[in-house]
Amino acid sequence: MRRLVALFVFALLGAALYGVSGSTSGIVVNSQTLSANTFETELSAISHNNTLQCFVTALSPTSYAPGAGGYSIKASGAAAWANLRVEGLAIHQYVATTLKYRPSAHDLALAESSLVGEMTAQASANSINCPGTATQAVAAMPSEMRTAEILAQADSLYLVKKIKTTIPLTTASMESYYAQHTSDYDTLCVSVALVLPSSVTAFAQGEAAGLNVATLVRKYSQDPTSAAKGGAVGCFSPSSTSYASVRADVTSLPLNTFATTPNYISNNGQTFALYVAATKRTTTPFSAAAATVLADLQSLNASSANKIKNDLLHAAAVHVDPAFGRWGLNTTGPTVFASATPAASDVTGSKKLSTTAATYK
């Protein structure tokens, strides 16, 4: 489930309500059933409690605002919550039946603390100022929803430990990974060239002919500030907010070499080809690279978790009440799609209904 993935990236596992009273089996995953009434109660709580809605939105960015009716929720929110609930049920069944896991009271206490921590961290990461606290958001959940979410967190924490490719997020593991990938955390000094699309071929030919970075920039770059310095825009350490994108642009290139294929950007309504070259690499000590190492390990672990989640969902027999969403397959795996709803203009108004009814009196 997404919380399984989110344990590494602070994204919440959730679910939501769509405002249609349904059958007793709103969602069925293999032999587990979540009643429509329970699901609707959860959705109503999310859409009508500002604190809970804010933290759920921070963790799973979707609109959970009320829909057209007083106790409804938008179709996108209902589908998002249904998807998270399906994932949670699939993982719970796997760890309970295959791994024989039964969380202890201590496990559940840790899971609740972990859930609150994820909600708090994700709200901060997304610069969302929620009314109240994550602890209050969890407390605002209906009791059955709160129990289910804490259990889902405990199940995910346990399953994560069982994934063979998971790298423990300990200082020792991080230092070991850093030692094996030290060059991935070099401080990078870079130069850039902002080139008109009409000059891209000439730029490439100039580099192939042996022109150095500074010469190419001064000849072709449309950015006068950096061009005056031969394209130099500074050095980026792993602690820089731009480091990830800079590293991605130059990681496979030798020093003082522009990529053959540039990125294209738009600036003031005009398109430019952006070339980036690393001109210097300096080893960064682990202490300065630790935060980036942690983020990389979180990403690697999230990929492993996502594969496990998709494997479980592919194997699961899932039924979702059409009022809440439509179970199907997209490019990333099985998921719940939002139900299609008619536009207001396609619905007969009350005056027309009254007129029609009068005809048959």
Image: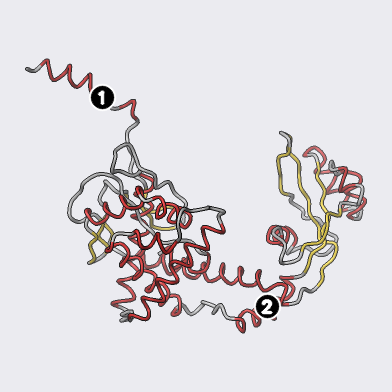
Asked if the residues shown at circle 1 and circle 2 are in contact, with their CB atoms under 8 angstroms apart, the answer is no
Q: Image quarter for residue 313?
A: bottom left
Which quadrant holds the N terminus? bottom left
Which is nearer the eye, 169 or 128?
Answer: 128
165 left or right, relative to 348: right
Residue found 34% across the figure and 76% down from its top = 95
- Find residue 148 and report its horizontal and vertical position in percent: 31, 66
Residue found 30% across the figure and 76% down from its top = 96
Disc 1 and disc 2: Cα gap in Å? 64 Å
Amino acid type at mark 2: Tyr
182 left or right, relative to 296: right
- Find residue 273 and report its horizontal and vertical position in percent: 76, 44
Which is nearer the eye, 98 or 291?
Answer: 291
Residue found 25% across the figure and 51% down from its top = 321
Which is nearer the eye, 54 or 261?
Answer: 54
Residue 80, compared with residue 348, is above or below; it is: below
- Find residue 255 and report its horizontal and vertical position in percent: 83, 64
Which residue lies under the disc numbered 2? 178
Which residue lies under the disc numbered 1? 348
Amino acid type at mark 1: Thr
Which quadrant holds the C terminus? top left
- Find residue 180 and report its horizontal and vertical position in percent: 68, 80
Going by the picture, which residue comes out furthest to the front?
A: 132
* Way the structure is coloured: secondary structure
Within-10-Å neighbours for mark 1: few <14, some 14–19, many 20+: few
229 left or right, relative to 344: right
Q: Image quarter for residue 25?
A: bottom left
State which tag comes first along the sequence, 1 or 2.
Answer: 2
